[in-house]
Image: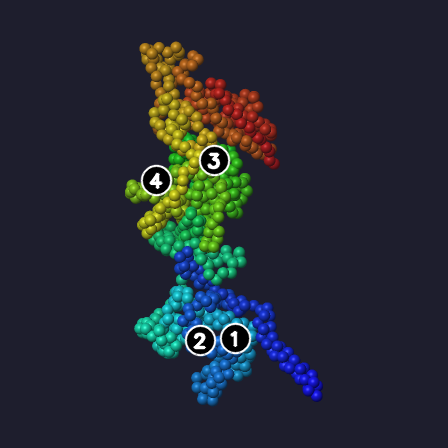
Amino acid sequence: MKGLFSRLRWPRWHNVLVALLLVAAVPVACRLWPHDPLRAWLPSSTAVYDDRGQLLRLTLASDDRYRLWVPLEDISPALVDGVLLHEDRWFRWHPGVSAWGLMRGAWVTYVRHGNPQGGSTVTMQLARLLWHLDTRSPGGKLVQAMRAMQLELQYSKHDILEAYLNAAPYGRNVEGVGAASLAYFSKPPARLSLPEALTLAVIPQEPARGLPGNANGTGVIDKALRASRDRLFARWVERHPEDASARPLFDLPLRLRSLSRLPFEAPHFVEQVLADRRLTGGDDMRVTTTLDLGLQHSLERQVRQYVDHASARGIRNAAALLVDTRDMGIKAMVGSADYFDPAIFGQVNGTQAKRSPGSTLKPFIYALGFDQGILHPETVLRDVPSAFGPYTPENFDGRFLGPVTATQALIRSRNIPAVQVAARLGNPNLYQFLRDAGVSRMQSEQHYGLALVLGGGEVTMQELAGLYAMLANRGELRPLRTEATQPNGKGTRLLSEEASFMVMDMLRQNPRPDDAVAAQPSRLPVYWKTGTSWGFRDAWTAGSFGPYVLVVWIGNFDSTGNPAFVGVDAAAPLFFRIADALRAERPGLAEPIRRNPPNLRRLPICLASGDLPNTWCPQVGSTWFIPGKSPIKVSNVHRPVVVDNRSGKPACPPFDRETTHTEVYEYWPSDLARVFAQAGMARRTPPPLPDCQGGGQPPGDPPRITSPLKGSTYQIRVSRFGTEKIAFTATTDAGVRTLYWFVDNAYVGSTPAGQTWMWTPERTGRFLVRVVDDRGASDARDLGIGSVE
């Protein structure tokens, strides 16, 4: 019988064991079953900070709430313990529902008819917030309790408490301790003081009570909220007697910042950061940017004051951009003079708008010319009336200076020399260089032609800042950065170190527009260039000082012109106001240490010609020179002429020292000699040389064809063949009197030196144009003739 009973009892214990295992497996299965983390239930705001941790903006979440998820470990322990002490002391022990709390709430609410009390636990409150439950009725309360137990089955106590603290209401549209701490106290919840922590702990029970923007309007918490906080502190001291010494802090008035005073700093910059994050899919709630709020305020102040001061000249809008060349971080961005002014379309970000850059691209033409061996900083260029095929540029002031060095041509922004250099560029030319540099939305190269040199295209301020930062960084192009997490890697080399250094040295010599300040010595050089667009629509100044690149723009977003919009008159004063303000505010500002390029030398030159000085050069200077690349020859401008003492005319050899003497004359090419004469700049005319061989001086320079352009093709309408004319021009040495023109070795005519021959083509095809001067020296180039209907 015992064996029989024993056999009958084992199945019963087995069933009990299985039942217990099944009961234990339910919560385990619920916990392990895949489900979204509680953080995914609530959309989050984004907090944008500057590079020093100062809040720039707290955005609204997608449900129009300020809500910023903060891990439980990053919340002040005083706030966590205060919430549990105030709302749910048994949170860590109950299964999500407190029977005692529910009965007490029902007794007070329905039996004693006192103030309604729900008796909800933290878990039940979280359930109400997540499922938007109506818990004012017994049925709603039952659903809330069931949802609370569901949460307890699926999530840990840690996760539930973390979610509640990030979802609890804190007045108006503020939810969660992260947003509340930032909005009301301007600090993260980990740094709250005890009075601040206990204040936030009691707000969720009555979230509309005593908050800024309500009846009191002072920002100081009202008596009711303060009394509730103080009662909690009394209970807190019972558990934490060591904090009794903090009682005097609770006697001080506590201010909460109004939501209307939440930071709204650097609006154009923040909006660009947020827009870029939407494009790249970034979902971090905390975004640390490269912006320096101190620099931002300085730029905003200078722009605002300058526009107010210059409003009488019709200057109503401006934009400014400051970039740190060391890490390419944008440190300050002022997209318009007033973000909130609709009259100037203030919410448009001017630093991202495509505008004509005027002459601000000229430094890159000279840099490319240095790299391609076309010139050096003291090469003498011709600022004379010139035609480049059908394109006939003029200088801004309508005047021509004649011979001008490349340095002076750049800092005085002469158009003709810049176009001359650009016309000689090979691969890359300016168009290809800008494409390689990432200038966006460019038309075809044929659309611009040589007009691109003088601002015929469009760039943004940010693209221009990147180009000038490339010069400062010795020819290495790196992308601009707006976020601290963006990589700061090695860039792309578009210019040599030597060319970039030489251009920067040229820009450093550009004198300030305000002579009084310019006379004062400064240890911090400024490298800068101005630009004015066609029709006076845009005034620019771009450059660098210390570690920064600064770009300033003056204009109107609707592209209306104003004669006051001239780079040197409108934009340069603002540029230097900002530079001077930053130097005053940051006395330690210094230029980064950059070594001189290794393959760079100083070379003596004749100042008049930019070439190596010959024996007769009266003034010698020096220039930077790239060995093996920069062009150089012996100067030929100053030449000796042996003159007969009695007649005063050049003598023929053999020369008698007793009856002759030597005089030095300047032999300028014909185009420059004509400009000197037009400008009233007297030059001693070299005497005509005798017919005897070797009379007077060594041979001069050969002629150089200036029109037609090298390798050019002219398109002529079929109906105009036989009547359409093409201009042939050439520069000549000072001693030349006559030029002889040939097409395919056939003589077509002659002209006095410096004058134009007009040739009439009779057919299409390729032709060889050649010119010979009266000394037998020559020059030639190809010409194409095409036809169009």
At label 4, the amino acid type is Pro
> Of label 3 and label 2, which has the lower sequence position?
2
Residue 371 got which mark? 3
Residue 127 got which mark? 1
Figure colour scheme: rainbow
> Of label 2 and label 4, which has the lower sequence position?
2
Circle 4 or circle 1, nearest the eye: 1
Q: Dot 3 surroundings within 10 Å: few (below 14), some, or many (20 or more)?
A: many
Element type where label 3 sits in the image: helix
Between marks 2 and 4, how big is the CA–CA gap?
69 Å
Q: Point out the residue furthest to the bottom here.
A: 111
Q: Nearer the viewer, residue 122 or 256?
A: 122
Element type where label 4 sits in the image: loop
The residue singled out by tag 4 in the image is 511
Vertical placement of 553 versus 655: above or below? below
Residue 423 location (% of width, % of height): 49, 34
Element type where label 2 sits in the image: helix
Residue 614 location (% of width, % of height): 38, 23
Q: Residue 562, can we see it?
A: no
At label 3, the amino acid type is Asp
Residue that appears at 49% across and 41% down? 494
Between marks 4 and 1, how big is the CA–CA gap?
70 Å
Residue that appears at 36% across and 24% down? 617
